[in-house]
Amino acid sequence: MGRVIGIDLGTTNSCVACFEGGAPVVISNSEGSRTTPSVVAFSKIGERLVGNTAKRQAAVNASRTVSSIKRQMGTDYCFRADNRDYTPQEISAMILQKLKKDAEAYLGTEVTGAVITVPAYFNDAQRQATKDAGRIAGLEVLRIINEPTSAALAYGLDHATPQKIMVFDLGGGTYDVSLIEISEGLIEVLATAGDNHLGGDDFDQRLADYILEEYRREHKINLAKDISAVERIKEACENAKKELSTAIQTSINIPFIATLKGEPIHLYFDITRAKFEELTEDLVRRTEAPVQQVLQDAGVKASELGMVLLVGGSTRMPAVREKVRQMTGKEPSGNINPDECVALGAAIQAARLAGEASDEFVTDLILMDVTPLSLSIETIGGIATKIIDRNTTIPTSHKQIFSTAANYQTSVDIKVLQGERQFAKDNKLLGNFRLTGIKRAPAGVPQIEVSFDIDVNGIVNVSAKDLGTGKEKSITITAGTNMSEDEIERAVFEAQAFSADDGIRKKRFDAVSDAGRMAAVGHQYLKVNKKELEREKKREIQRRTANLERMSRRKAERLSDAEVDEILAEIQALQDLIGTGL
């Protein structure tokens, strides 16, 4: 067997880690970054771009670029490219395959297994979809674990002092809160809650919507109809959000955003932290309910918390940190990297399961997680009758006896539900099956035993047995949005076919993308320094910037090697002139 890794498959960015020298280590990608954008693109010549390369060309190839696919896991969403529909599992597998390849380059050997993390509030269908994505990418998924639990595992490796901690995990697209107890040799999740549709993406979108509306109002131009312009604005808003975490004001400056009567027009906005926090106040407020819920479910007061651990890049926003202080009365921890701790915890768990760890704390550690949502079956009157309550420690197994509702009934339909609502129709239908061969008898006489099993991955197995006849039927829940074995096998084959990295094509797309970015840098430099520049240097910068502007409009797939070298030389020349790069 090859090596194993831990993967934080994120909405906005993903991270991969391994266990080396008795400690988890983050693996940098082929571009030198410690995290990889969870972005996939399809070029017009059939190439698949993943990560930094895909993100950098998104503005010029918006309709063939997909991001935040994690929000679609477990749904019937498909992304269409080249007359082919791609499921969320297949798109996610492309990201996982990139992370696997980067890990193999770092370790110098084959990677065969992985522990992959998911939001604590992911339901069964979303967990199964994540597991399928790992299989398509050529990985044996050793375990699916919850992101807050994984972060607590990374924290507990160096802070094994017995205490109750709250993990506040606000990522790019999902939000989870877990209350976890760390004691000697044990990490136990007491309660979890969250919102699968709240994250940094929503903050970016809120700012982008504001800028689009202000620009339309001021210039009478509706940029929302221009896919490429919207993509550039969203990228600029994401950067502005990050800058406002440390600065009280920043600028959004996008040259050549569109044309009007043949003339290029630009976009420029000054954004203050106060304005950004005003625009996103309701999003921050949405973090309150899950915090209150986990404290209530666990029967713990905020004053009893030993630590509040912040996870996810979105927790860097000052308004979010202040909200955490208000809700818990605690100063959030700052001694763990919110972007990397989930992957580090996953690497620890992977090493434990594969026998790669020798440290006594790691090998002897017991990890006890919980199911985030209640599991039920539909009974008479459309009622959701709970079999397993939320926050039950997993793995677990529960049984309950039911009977027939009509006289001489010979079959029953078992509808499996997930959620907290009283009526079946208001919960998530995970799947259903029919138990046949029930002995004919008056209503209420047959005894039908329904068993629910939740494994360590949080994936559900259900069986029903007629105790009178011994007839039994069981299923592993797979919602209609999950892939069949044949579909998974086909996707595995296609993933392998595209696994070879096409360095030449990648270099072409990078060159065109970098040309546009460097041209923007040149415009900004001229704007800021125009009064201090000597005439000849100013003209040279203007000339180089204009050249790069033209080069950025070239079709990457049509470039020759000589033309790529010409673009790279032009970029370097402008960098040398102004003393700064991309």
Image: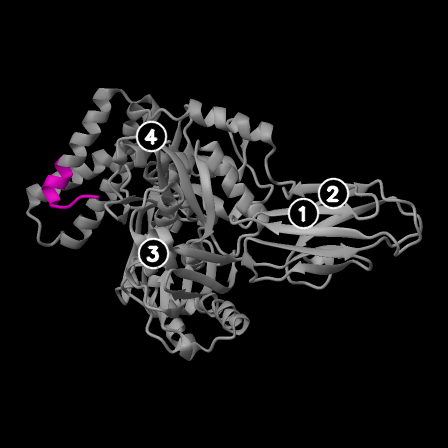
For disc 3, the marked residue is: 154
In magenta stretch: residue 399: no
- The one of 153 and 11 positioned closer to us in this rendering: 153
Q: Left of 331 or right of it: where is 95?
A: right
For disc 1, the marked residue is: 462
Residue 349 visible within the image: yes
Q: Which residues are magenta?
A: 573-582
Q: Identify the residue at image location x=50%, y=35%.
A: 90
Q: Left of 322 or right of it: where is 372?
A: right
Q: Please rate how many residues cluster around mark 3, counting C-alpha atoms within 10 Å: few if below 14, some from 14 to 19, many from 20.
A: many
Distance from Cα at disc 3 to Cα at disc 1: 33 Å
| Rendered view: 433 above or below 292 | above
Residue 214 visible within the image: no
Question: Quick one: label 1 or label 4, which is nearer the N terminus?
Answer: 4
Question: Quick one: label 1 or label 2, which is nearer the N terminus?
Answer: 2
Q: Please rate how many residues cluster around mark 1, counting C-alpha atoms within 10 Å: few if below 14, some from 14 to 19, many from 20.
A: many
**Dominant SS type (magenta):** helix
Give SS at disc 4.
loop
Q: In which quadrant will I find the N terminus?
A: top left
Occupied quadrant, residue 206: bottom left
Distance from Cα at disc 1 to Cα at disc 2: 9 Å
Q: Are marks 3 and 2 in contact (CB under 8 Å)?
A: no
Residue 433's label in the rendered image is 2
Distance from Cα at disc 3 to Cα at disc 2: 40 Å
For disc 4, the marked residue is: 110
Distance from Cα at disc 1 to Cα at disc 4: 36 Å
Q: Are marks 2 and 4 in contact (CB under 8 Å)?
A: no
